[in-house]
Image (cartoon, rainbow, N blue to C red):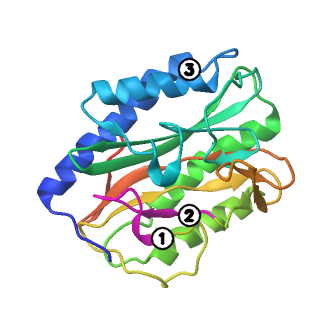
Amino acid sequence: MITLKSNREIELMKIAGNIVYKTHQYLKPFLRPGITTKKIDDLADQYIRDQGAIPSCKNYQGFPASICISINDEIVHGIAGNRNLADGDIVTLDICACYKGYHGDSAWSYAIGNIDEEKSHLMKYTEEALYIGLKEVRPGNRIGDIGNAISNFAKEHHLGVVKELCGHGIGQNLHEAPDVPNYGTINTGVRLKEGMTIAIEPMLTAGSPNVEILDDDWTVVTEDGHPAAHFEHTVVVTKDGYKILTGE
């Protein structure tokens, strides 16, 4: 069921989203060659808790870490461990926080040191795809308008659109209705209404969009080994457009 959020609920989600945003900003200086993904996860966990929130990912459907950390060909749901970041990697931090029962969710991909042209192109246009999708968020438009805009933009820049993964509604649950795919047909799908809160998250690849899941049953990787990038904001639909909740 799709729920329209009250002003009180939106304010709580704004606080949760701001905690997610601040966690990203806090972690950025640590994203250097040599740091382990476990250290990043520990830093995120402590920071989120210090803000009076809890990491939404921790134990979510059994997920063992506090945030998702995905490197290079890992698209989503990478699990922290002893792996070190290296020069030339791209790493995606997917951070979710719950504040007084409401969630915020934002993913961002970061370059570690000097990255090659393929990864640079991928990151630039995946981030731009997020904002292309956001332009379609306003009352009266439909979910298909968002996905159509993202997929057309991705194709223009020769990037693959992962179809097995999508954005989602968000609120008292981390994942709520409706699904928000990164592909679609104009004027199809759920109609957007003021008060809806959704997470829009292009997940694009530099090669084939086909995916597989690793033996840990969580980490989703590209089938051909080419890198992937992932950018996400939680937004609320307003009377004349949208407002980003996972920002300052």
Residue 41 - label = none
- Quarter holding the C terminus is top left
Marked residue nearer the N-terminal end (1 or 3) = 3
Residue 14 falls in image quadrant: top left
Residue on which the image places disc 2: 166
For the residue marked with disc 2, what is the amino acid?
Cys
Residue on which the image places disc 1: 179
For the residue marked with disc 3, what is the amino acid?
Lys
Is 185 on the left or on the right of 171, as rendered?
right
| Most distant residue in the left direction | 8
Give residue 202's position: percent from left, percent from top: 58, 56
Proximity of marks 2 and 1: CB atoms separated by less than 8 Å:
yes
The residue under the point 71% across, 25% down is 83
Res. 248 visible in picture: no
Label 3 crowding class (10 Å Cα cut-off): few <14, some 14-19, many 20+? some
Proximity of marks 2 and 3: CB atoms separated by less than 8 Å:
no
Label 1 crowding class (10 Å Cα cut-off): few <14, some 14-19, many 20+? some
Secondary element under disc 2, as helix, strand or loop, is loop
Residue 39 - label = 3
Task: Write the start and end of the magenta stretch as one range.
Answer: 165-178
Marked residue nearer the N-terminal end (2 or 1) = 2
Give residue 60's position: percent from left, percent from top: 45, 50
